[in-house]
Image (cartoon, coloured by chain):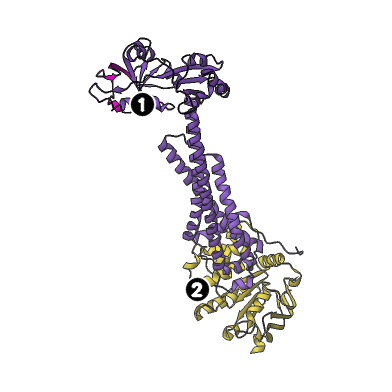
Chain colours: A purple, B yellow
């Protein structure tokens, strides 16, 4: 700087003030161009928030159900076995070190009807299963009405109905001591179960005790499914040996499943959708950025006289560029904050509606604002440089 | 002390054919002088204003403002020179519509780095000086033409510049309002402000103590009112 000259200066606060006034005098246009950013940021925040909230709900569900439940079933079909497990399969599985409990289910090959007048063919898709008394503990099931089978009732013609079975049989409560026609005799219904989250097939079954099945239905009680709870640290080890332990002669005929895998697969599918929606949000954000660039370019053209005036008042090229960049950044900030608020609102409302915990990832909230600022900078840079390069005498010619 | 000095200033625009807007313009303005540059349209008045105001560099000759030689200064230094030493008044006023009169005037010293409160205090003083002490909070759109030009004059004065350049300050005003603006400029001159007025209006030019006549980009005459008779 030449001696005797004091450089032109523009305080940061004044850049902000000038930007606020600049946008306030063009309210509608500013609002519309900020709206593009609002939509982009809101959709990204909502997508991240909702996916996080639903994931947390799934984790809570998995936590409740436990991922250490395994089922052992006899394979069926050509090359997959006879559909039978050895009689002592459950006892052998229980001998695997990390196995905590086992519970056997055996298909009693009978049907259940509301009364003895129902034609045999109308079985309603319901089955009769002989079960161990620890079934509820092993599966994490619960009783809706009455009681589950116990040592005493398991010996007599009594049954506990799965939730779907009870509904199809038209039994909603136990107050009128309902009975069902099961096999060739009446069975008293002593309990109705809540839905099983991991074993929907048991929801469509009438459950009887092993002894009752033997006595009244002539069942041999060959295990069809064994539910196994293991030490959660050794689930994979148990899976590795389960087949050979349950059926040492032909381990390949044994199907071992982890029911929670299905839930995790569903989540993976949702993750793919999340990525898609994030991509759409990014496109919306980009369009919003183009909107800001467009508005700023028009603004520079319209305000040539103002640019000339400011140069005459002593603004340097940098000051002029800062003014227009400041306006673009302010637009983007307003859009970013609005978008984060809207996205958080949508997430909260939807998560509450679905009964999930509301989870707003910090990365989405901060990332939303940062993304808006980046877009604003990129969108504002070109118009700002154009404004700065305008020759003052040229600019002053416009009214 | 010489505030503005032009020596053999020429300005040629590189069009085809080239336009020689100024040729060998030489005159100077001393501190406290009130000078009018008068000439018909196309005589190079606007170009001369831009050159005097350091908004444009001449293609020939030398310009010095407040002792600083324009050809030695960078773009940033010219901005610094304008922010402290030159005040502009334009025919179209160039007020910012979203601002109050006070803030329009305060922006006259925006680029000096003074804090907002001080800028507004100075703006209030300048507006009172031009007789608009009662219009501080009015936005530019709510002011009459004469009032707008007074706001623009206050904006040119607010930083206490070495020289005020007024380009057709009465061009958009009716004759009664024009008279009051000329009277205001005369009053400021009596207070010691150095002013150069540019106009095509000979009648108005006749009211100023010294006139520089411009024709075809050259100085036709440079005389005091007494000499012009």
How many circles with numbers are drawn on the protein? 2
The residue under the point 41% across, 36% down is: A354
Q: Which residue is nearer to you in this view: A126 or A86?
A: A86
Q: Is residue A57 left or right of residue B227?
A: left
User: Which quadrant of the figure has residue B45?
Assistant: bottom right
| Residue A318 seen in the current view | yes
Q: Which residue is nearer to you in this view: A16 or A156?
A: A156
Which of the labelled discs sits on residue A341, or is there none? Answer: none
Q: Is residue A346 above or below residue B96?
A: above
Question: How far is mark 2 from mark 1, CA to CA?
Answer: 89 Å
Residue denoted by label 2: B145
Q: Is residue B181 left or right of residue B76?
A: left
Q: Position of residue A100 (x, y in %)?
A: 51, 16
2 vs 1, front mark: 1
Residue denoted by label 1: A204
Of helix, strand and loop, which one carries label 2?
A: helix
Q: Count residues near mark 2 (Cα–Cα under 10 Å), then give few for <14, some for 14-19, many for 20+.
A: some
């Amino acid at each position: 700087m030449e001696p005797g000259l004091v450089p032109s200066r523009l305080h940061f606060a004044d850049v902000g003030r000038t930007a606020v006034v600049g946008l306030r005098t063009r309210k509608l246009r500013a609002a519309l161009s900020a709206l593009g950013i609002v939509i982009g940021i809101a959709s990204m925040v909502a997508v991240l928030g909702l996916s996080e909230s639903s994931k947390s709900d799934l984790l809570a569900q998995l936590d409740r159900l436990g991922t250490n439940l395994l089922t052992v079933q006899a394979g069926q079909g050509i090359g997959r076995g006879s559909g039978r497990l050895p009689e002592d399969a459950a006892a052998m599985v229980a001998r695997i070190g990390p196995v905590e409990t086992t519970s056997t289910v055996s298909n009693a090959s009978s049907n259940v009807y509301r009364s003895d007048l129902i034609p045999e063919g109308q079985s309603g898709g319901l089955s009769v299963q002989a079960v161990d008394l620890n079934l509820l503990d092993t599966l994490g099931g619960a009783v809706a009405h009455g009681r589950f089978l116990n040592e005493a009732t398991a010996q007599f013609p009594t049954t506990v109905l799965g939730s779907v079975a009870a509904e199809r049989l038209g039994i909603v409560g136990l107050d009128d001591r309902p009975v069902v026609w099961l096999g060739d005799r009446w069975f008293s219904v002593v309990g109705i179960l809540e839905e099983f989250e991991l074993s929907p097939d048991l929801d469509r079954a009438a459950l009887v005790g092993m002894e009752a099945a033997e006595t009244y239905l002539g069942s041999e009680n060959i295990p069809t499914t064994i539910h196994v709870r293991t030490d959660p640290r050794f689930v994979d080890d148990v899976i590795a040996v389960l087949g050979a332990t349950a059926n040492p002669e032909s381990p390949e005929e044994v199907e071992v499943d982890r029911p929670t895998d299905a839930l995790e697969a569903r989540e993976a599918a949702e993750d793919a959708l999340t990525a898609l929606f994030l991509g759409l949000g990014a496109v919306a954000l980009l369009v919003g950025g183009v909107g800001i660039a467009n508005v700023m370019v028009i603004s520079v053209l319209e305000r040539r006289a103002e640019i000339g005036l400011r140069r005459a008042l002593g603004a340097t090229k940098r000051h002029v560029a800062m003014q227009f960049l400041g306006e673009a950044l302010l637009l983007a900030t307003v859009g970013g904050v609005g978008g984060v608020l809207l996205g958080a609102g949508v997430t909260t409302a939807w998560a509450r509606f679905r009964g999930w915990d509301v989870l707003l990832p910090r990365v989405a909230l901060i990332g939303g604002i940062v993304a808006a600022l980046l877009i604003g900078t990129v969108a504002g840079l070109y118009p700002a440089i154009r404004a700065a390069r305008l020759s003052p005498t040229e600019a002053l010619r416009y009214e | 002390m010489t505030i503005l000095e032009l020596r053999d200033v020429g300005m040629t625009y590189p069009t085809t054919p080239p336009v020689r807007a100024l040729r060998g313009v030489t005159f100077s303005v001393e501190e406290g002088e009130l000078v009018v540059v008068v000439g018909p349209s196309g005589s190079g008045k606007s170009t001369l204003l831009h050159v005097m105001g350091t908004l444009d560099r001449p293609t020939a000759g030398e310009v010095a403002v407040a002792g600083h030689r324009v050809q030695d200064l960078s773009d940033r230094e010219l901005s610094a020179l304008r922010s402290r030493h030159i005040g502009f008044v334009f025919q179209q006023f160039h007020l910012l519509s979203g601002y109050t009169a006070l803030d329009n005037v305060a922006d006259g010293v925006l680029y000096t780095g003074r804090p907002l409160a001080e800028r507004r205090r100075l703006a209030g003083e300048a507006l009172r000086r031009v007789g608009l002490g009662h219009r501080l909070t009015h936005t530019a759109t709510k002011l009459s033409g004469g009032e707008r030009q007074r706001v623009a004059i206050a904006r040119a004065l607010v930083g206490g510049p070495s020289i005020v350049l007024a380009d057709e300050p009465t061009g958009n005003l009716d004759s009664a309002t024009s008279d009051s603006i000329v009277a205001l400029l005369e009053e400021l001159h009596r207070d010691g402000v150095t002013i150069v007025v540019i106009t095509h209006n000979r009648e108005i030019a006749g009211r100023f103590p010294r006139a520089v006549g411009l024709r075809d980009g050259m100085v036709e005459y440079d005389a005091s009112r007494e000499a012009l008779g």
